[in-house]
Each structure stands twice: as C-alpha cells, then as structure tokens.
Image (cartoon, rainbow, N blue to C red):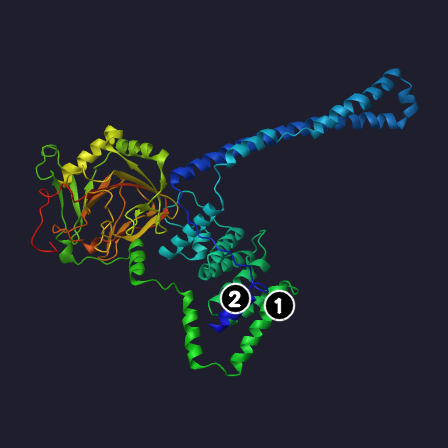
Amino acid sequence: MALNKVWCALALGFLLPFSCAHTDFFTSIGHMTDLINTEKDLVVSLKDYIKAEESKLEQIKKWAEKLDQLTATATKDPEGFLGHPVNAFKLMKRLNTEWGELESLVLKDMSDGFISNMTIQRQFFPNDEDQTGAAKALLRLQDTYNLDTDTLSRGNLPGVKHKSFLTAEDCFELGKIAYTEADYYHTELWMEQALKQLDEGEVSSADKVYILDYLSYAVYQQGDLGKAMALTKRLLELDPEHQRANGNMKYFEYIMAKEKEGNKSSTDSEEQEKETEVKKKDYLPERRKYEMLCRGEGLKMTPRRQKRLFCRYYDGNRNPRYILGPVKQEDEWDKPRIVRFLDIISDEEIETVKELAKPRLSRATVHDPETGKLTTAHYRVSKSAWLSGYESPVVSRINTRIQDLTGLDVSTAEELQVANYGVGGQYEPHFDFGRKDEPDAFKELGTGNRIATWLFYMSDVSAGGATVFPEVGASVWPRKGTAVFWYNLFPSGEGDYSTRHAACPVLVGNKWVSNKWLHERGQEFRRPCTLSELE
C-alpha cells in the first residue's frame, strides 16, 4: 500500500496524467445505420468538392500551359514580339485584366458546399462519450466471449459478413480508453497488441514511445515490477532523454535494490501475490456462470431431465381462437418452466413494431428499488421504446395474443417494450420481479408485482445475444419470430429466484426484442394462490 501511495505521489512528476471517464455506449443499430448514411452523404459531398477543385486546377493548368508557350516565344525576341501592335495590346490586357481574373480563380474557395454540409451533419456526430462507450463495448465482448486481442484485432469473429481489422493506432486508442477507466488489465492487453503490430512492420502514426509509456505504467499497476522495468528500458533506448521514463527507472531501481537487500517480509510477499492476481479478471461466481452461458458453455441437462421436455401444438387451454389453429410450443427448460412459442409473430408485424419504435428509441431504463421510479443503469446497455395497444391495431393484436396464450389479463400489464441491442448491448443478471426488500418497486403502477414475462425475438443474431439464467444454467438463443414465456412468481405470490436472467452482449449482428411484463392485479381467478409458498 505504501508503494502505491508513493507511486501516486509521483504521478504528476513522472507518470501519465490521470483522467476519468464514466460513460457507456447506448446507441442502437438503428441509430448506427443513420450514422452510416450520414457518412455516405459526407463522402458524396467530399467527392463533389474534389471534382470542383480538380476543375479549378484544370482551368489554372490550361492557363499556365498557354502562357508558358506564349512567354517562351516572347522572351526569345522581346523587341520583335512587341513590335507587333496586337501583341503589345494583349500584354497590357493580360497583366491588367486576365491575371487579376486568374488570381480570383486561385483564391476562390471551392469548399463552401462541403463545409456547409459538414456543419449541418456534425450535430448528429457521436461525441467523445460515444467513442469511449464503443471502446468499452469491445472490451466487454472480449471478456464475455474470451477473445484474445489478436483475434479481435484481425476481425476473426464468427458469423461476420464484412470483415474488418484494427490498426495499431486503433489498438492504442482502446488501450488509452481502458487507461482512463483505470482498467490496467485491458490497457496492458491493447498496448501490447499495438506494439506487436508495429514490431511486425505495420506503418502507423502510433508512436512506440507513447505506447511503452502507457504499457509500463499499466504493468506496474498490476504488480509486475520486473516487466515494467524492462519496458521502461526499451522506451529509453528509443528516447534516452524521456524525462518521465528516466524518473520511473530510478524509482524501479530503488525498489529492486530494496528487494535484493532482503528487507521484504513474508507479509509483503503475500501482498504482492495478491496484487499480481489483479491481472486475472476476478469475477464473482455468478459472473463466471453468466459468461460461460453466453459462450454456450453452460450446464447440460441430464438425459433424464431432457426426456421431460416436449414440443406440442398448444391451443391456449382451448381458447376459441386457437382450437382450430393451435400454435407450436416447445419446452426450453423445466425448473423454472420456460416455454418457447414458434412462428408467433409475423415478419410484417415485426417490421410494424420496429417502425413504430424507432423514432422514440431512448436509453433503456430499470426500476429503482428505492424510489420505485425508472432510471438508467450501467448494467443495461440498449435502447428501448414503449408501445400502447391504442397506437396501432398490430400492437393491440399482439397484446390479445399474449393474453389468449398465457391465460393472463393484459389490461394490468405494462406497455409493450421494444428494445434494440447494438454493439456490445447487454442486460446483466437481474430479476424482473420486485423482491421483499423492494416494497415500492412497482408502487406507482398500482398493479402489484410482475407475475410473468413474455419475450418476443424479432431478429436472428449472428453471434451472441442469448438470454441466460445463471442460477439454473439455462441458455435461450434468439430465433426470429419466436417468443419465450416464464412465470416470475410462484402461485403463492412469492418470487421465483431461479428466474434471475440476463441478456448476453451481441457479438456480431444486432438484436431486436419486445417484451410484455404481466402484473398480479387481475390474475386472482386466472392463476389462483396455493397453500404452499413455493408452488
């Protein structure tokens, strides 16, 4: 601890300046698509500017070529040339008028159209916070899906249609953003990748000295003094006069000398081992399970349990609308019971819902257990919108369908929520229902707790994006046109804690979902209470 205090005290004198950023990337694919169209428009505008400049230069070039020939002839015999009255007149005219016109042409600014368009479009540009958020999304994907920096840098991801790679400068930028978040683990990974690509001969504006400066500090912060010293030596080979590196080197040598003197106690040894372990992402058990499930490495059901899962044609307990045309239903999990309905929403309905939602997509919110109000949260990264049944017959029809197939009253349910998960979009493990220590979770609604969840998948996802239940090891993968349903509460009204679930980050592609949270009020005779607390 004393070591860290000394190092922090030296930060202003030797180390890189500290800065903080507490942002995240909440932009949906829909908004990103708009940005692509904006960039396309700017490219067209830029090409128009280039054509205008080329046209201008072509005129100047023709003028120069014409005068070059004329002056070459005139300078050979100036007196003879000017002896012709027409040549004398034209010389006066050129110098008095035409050179002035050429000057005006040279000074003419052809960039007005492009600059004007740029000014208009700039209001839609992402800002520093968006760039930081996009970088953090990449780091989140790297952790969740166990991607090494080289794989990510080369764009070798499953299911990609348009392969792209990261330059050394891009890797350096990712490392810097991790550094501003005091995330030295990722700082080291990405600064090393940037250095590796430069060592392999990549031509880049990224400077090895700057990279080594960040890298040595990140390594030191994780307890590897020897490696930090070696990196600083390499930096000094490139720039012997580097003030911060020279100061750091003296400090490292001082610490190393103390270690060699044998003044280090066994307690210090154990402390350094703990510090070194910071390099390993020390997640909580739930976090590890969550990430494993996202990668498809979850618990596998025993054959005996699998035999209890069936697929069937379901008529909504003889609902008149489905007796002659039952829907396909299959069991995804047994406890908690999670069922999937197939071909339950058409492509036309999906497009209508998306079009209704797109103009009003905003940062997704969660219920604050203390205030009972909606608020944003760092663990939910998506854009969402709410749709009422009265807005569109399609939404009304969807609500009726949910009521018919669940047997639950939707009049007390929340509005249909539409969510779009873009780059690294996720919703970390959470409960849909309010726990006993959150008595005011849904007080403002006045409809009781969330008894059940209905979730539509409105797109396929190329890679990632599963809905996982870490408590039981279930993974439910997105399939366009399907919906999954589960009860959050037992019939007794007690919460089913095995329904804790999460939306995994989207690795490749984008994910559209819509969900309906059904509440207790109105279900008294549709799903009666039982005498047992857990039934």
Name the one closer to the observer, 301 or 260.
260
- Residue plotted at (47% across, 42% down): 126
Circles 2 and 1: CB atoms closer than 8 Å = no
Name the one closer to the observer, 199 or 228.
228
Does 232 sit above or below residue 258?
above
Residue 356's disc number: none
- Residue plotted at (56% across, 62% down): 213
Q: Secondary structure at mark 1?
A: helix
Task: From the viewer's perspective, tell me whether residue 308 is left or right of residue 349.
Answer: left
Residue 357 image position (x, y, % from top left): 32, 35
Residue 8's disc number: 2
2 or 1: mark nearer the eye: 2
Using the rendered image of the protein, determine whether residue 164 is visible from the camera's viewpoint.
no
Name the one closer to the observer, 149 or 262.
262
Residue 72 placement: quadrant: top right
Question: Which residue is the site of mark 1?
Answer: 246
